[in-house]
Image (cartoon, rainbow, N blue to C red):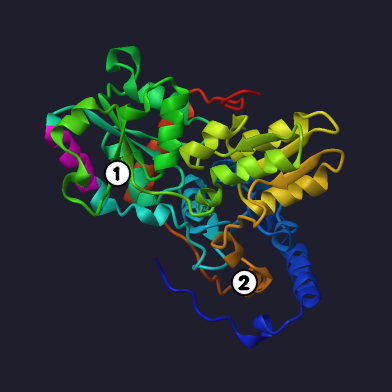
Amino acid sequence: METQIPLPSEYTRAETSELSNRIAARKEQLGAKLCVLGHHYQRDEVIRFADFTGDSLELSQLAAGQSGAEFIVFCGVHFMAESADILSSPGQQVILPNLHAGCAMAEMADVEDVAAAIEEVSALTGAAVIPVSYVNSTADIKALTARAGGACCTSSNVRNVFEWALRPAAEGGAGAEKVFCIPDQHLGRNTAIAMSRREDECRLYDPHLPNGGLSATDVERATFILWKGHCYVHQLFRPEHVTAVRKAHRDIRVIVHPECPREVVELADAEGSTSQIITAIEAAEAGSKWAIGTESNLVNRLAKRHKDKFICVLNQAGAACTQMCRIDLPHLLWALDGIASGQIVNRITVPPETAADARTALQRMIDIKAVTSVTRNL
Ligand code: SF4
């Protein structure tokens, strides 16, 4: 990844009100040539300037549909800007205001390590191993996934993608004997169990150990090989938080993201992707109480938006994505000033061959019918 240059002091020393006014003026000036995207986990002062908010894939697809928008400024993290570039139309340029905004989970899976791991696991038993990569992965991983016969997934459609991967090729599936889930172990384990698979059908692949720490017998018994990656934000949620919130609030319902550890998901009333959690809260009855196990900028915004319900972050200490928070007002204004002056900064471009293969992995996922409801108990 390229390095972020330090911002000139006119950005770092400016007051919030001045930065906000100048961003609003730049947006006005650039008009329909500009499309600002804001991920659900983005901080409030930035997201108020977003033309669209959503999860990473929704936003990339939306941006691609804005054919008049020459400049797509993605207020998210690096892999999201890559996906936007992969799906963008010719003539669109994707900009990430701060190059230090990377996803810690996506960075846990290096493409060369993953390629070697797929080969190692295949060689241990001779079984057909098909990768399924979460959209929270680099463009290189997505491209590798396509070349190895796999597909991408989101936290909304992962179950359908796993089922597709395990279906025989004669029935339109990928014919996998083993699914290699990259890079989030929790998403893989929680999904496998939601599919009524036994937990011991999942085996963790640790890239720091020979053969990932797996024996031929381990692989033989496994249906799901899980890359040892995680999201540090969702890993902040612990079983004791569920116990504490239930003690503090009678009749509260706990809903968590499938990036949370298994022991938290087991104690929750429901699990669902970011979009599914938002939909569940919107549909909930007035007066209902919710503790939500996902990123706290989003949860706090839901609480403000739905004042007729009690909504809190499951972990009272908070769970903000500090990677996403690296997109702040100074960086956003700096990126917009660059567009206005013709000196584009922080353009994200995926090499054409990688982009073509990554697009294949994304398209395979889109062609598999998506699940649209919360995955459990709602
Ligand atoms: S919340 Fe976790 S998975 Fe999402 S961008 Fe932040 S570090 Fe990555």
Horizontal side of 145 relative to 258 (left or right) equals left
Nearer to me, 40 or 81? 40
Task: Residue at 51%, 42% (x, y): give it.
Answer: 260
Determine whether the residue tagged by mark 1 lies in a helix, strand or loop: helix
Question: 10 Å neighbourhood of mark 2: few (<14), some, or many (≥20)?
Answer: many
Question: 10 Å neighbourhood of mark 1: few (<14), some, or many (≥20)?
Answer: many
Q: Vertically, is 359 above or below 370?
A: below
Label 2 sits on what residue type?
His
Nearer to me, 310 or 70? 310
Task: Residue at 53%, 81% (x, y): give it.
Answer: 6
Q: Is residue 299 magenta?
A: no
Residue 218: x and y, percent?
Answer: 20, 32
Horizontal side of 121 relative to 249 (left or right) equals left
Q: Vertically, is 327 above or below 294?
A: below
Q: Please say whether residue 270 is visible from this viewpoint.
A: yes
Name of the residue lying farthest toward the top = 171
Q: How many marks?
A: 2
Residue 330: x and y, percent?
Answer: 66, 74
Residue, disc 1 = 144
Main secondary structure of the magenta stretch:
helix
Quadrant (top left, top right, bottom left, bottom right) of the C terminus:
top right
Residue, disc 2 = 331
Q: Vertically, is 260 above or below 372?
A: below
